[in-house]
Image: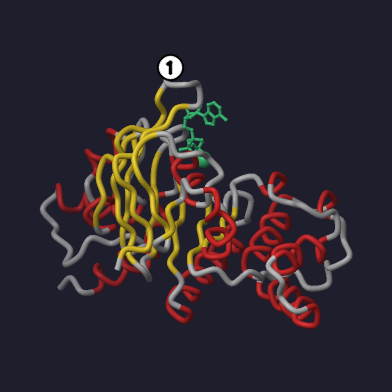
């Protein structure tokens, strides 16, 4: 069942002078982890800002969880079903203290008072930010801000979570932890995940990759089909992950591994199977 459907979506920020999205049609199924991959400026954020009606639909049609996003009466329900962690967390905070910010969503959606404190604590603890409840958001580091923004979305428990470069301010360990957590949310709670990224290395957790270039959806498919296609990636200003590059290089030299690896672990495993 498709949980997000886009048909022929187009968008321009300047009344049609420069189009930044062209004829985008895609389906995201319930329980998918989709990586929206593309170079800077390829239109990834513009696309996903439509999903929770932050941008007004200009061309085409979008439904999210069967909700028409261009009907303003639906926005309230829409934002309960889909949570977005934005690229720049500063734009996401609504309250100055961490705990008030995380509690803002549940408070607005009439979650009973006595449950809000618990939900806030749980969400902050999940992102490793317990103890920071009283801190002011503007005094946090970039990575800490990103974690608090994520807690704010988790406290709402939406069916669909969208991460717009949500790892950009995290250190390698924090990045890995978040990716593991995204996978866990998907596997254990059947959340649908859309992760926007220009890091090819992060796509290994996805079951589908949508490659964007200059406002168009260039290709959608299995991660190995997209990331193993060096020519396709190079034409979009990207390179395959290191492990995949080594696989492709070995192949050129006549050494064929039994699968196209996306991570170093997968590469090591397939080399060990060579004999
Ligand atoms: N608020 C805005 N006003 C005018 N143009 C914009 C605005 N936001 C984005 N654009 C333009 O739209 C195009 C797509 O930008 P978008 O932010 O969607 O790309 P992106 O793929 O998310 O890039 P990045 O990887 O850098 O985040 C770019 O050419 C950008 O300059
Ligand atoms: Mg962006």
Q: Is residue 44 above or below residue 21?
A: below
Q: Nearer the viewer, residue 193 or 57?
A: 57
Q: Position of residue 74 (x, y in %)?
A: 52, 56
User: On the rendered structure, is 191 left or right of 109?
Assistant: left
Q: Is residue 5 above or below residue 191?
A: above
User: On the rendered structure, is 140 left or right of 234?
Assistant: right
Q: Is residue 215 above or below residue 201?
A: above
Instruction: Please report the residue visible at 83 percent of the width from the left and 67 percent of the height from the top.
Output: 132
Query: According to the image, label 1 marks what residue?
Result: 17
- Tell me the colour scheme of the image: secondary structure
Q: Position of residue 3 (x, y in %)?
A: 37, 63
Q: Is residue 265 above or below residue 215?
A: below
Instruction: Please report the residue visible at 39 percent of the width from the left and 46 percent of the height from the top.
Output: 37
Q: Position of residue 131 (x, y in %)?
A: 83, 72
Residue 149 falls in image quadrant:
bottom right
For the N terminus, the image quarter is bottom left
Residue lying furthest left in this view?
Answer: 254
């Amino acid at each position: 069942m498709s949980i997000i459907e886009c048909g022929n979506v187009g968008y321009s920020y300047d009344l049609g002078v420069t189009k930044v999205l062209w004829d985008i049609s895609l389906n995201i199924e319930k329980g998918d982890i989709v990586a929206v991959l593309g170079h800077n400026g390829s239109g990834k954020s513009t696309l996903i800002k439509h999903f929770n009606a932050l941008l007004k639909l200009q061309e085409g049609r979008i439904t999210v969880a069967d909700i028409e996003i261009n009907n303003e009466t639906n926005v309230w329900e829409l934002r309960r079903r889909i949570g977005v962690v934005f690229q720049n967390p500063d734009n996401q905070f609504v309250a100055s203290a961490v705990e008030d910010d995380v509690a803002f969503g549940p408070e607005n959606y009439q979650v009973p008072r006595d449950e809000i404190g618990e939900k806030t604590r749980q969400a902050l603890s999940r992102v490793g930010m317990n103890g920071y409840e009283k801190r002011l958001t503007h005094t946090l580091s970039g990575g800490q801000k990103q974690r608090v923004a994520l807690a704010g979305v988790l406290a709402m428990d939406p069916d669909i979570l969208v991460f717009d470069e949500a790892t950009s301010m995290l250190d390698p360990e924090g990045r890995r932890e978040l990716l593991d957590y995204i996978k866990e949310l998907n596997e254990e709670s059947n959340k649908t995940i859309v992760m926007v990224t220009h890091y090819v290395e992060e796509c290994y957790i996805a079951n589908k990759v949508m490659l964007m270039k200059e406002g168009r959806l260039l290709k959608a498919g299995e991660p190995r089909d997209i990331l193993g296609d060096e020519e396709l990636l190079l034409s979009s200003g990207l390179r395959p992950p290191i492990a995949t590059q080594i696989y492709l290089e070995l192949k050129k030299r006549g050494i064929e591994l039994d699968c196209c690896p996306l991570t170093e672990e997968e590469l090591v495993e397939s080399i060990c199977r060579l004999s």
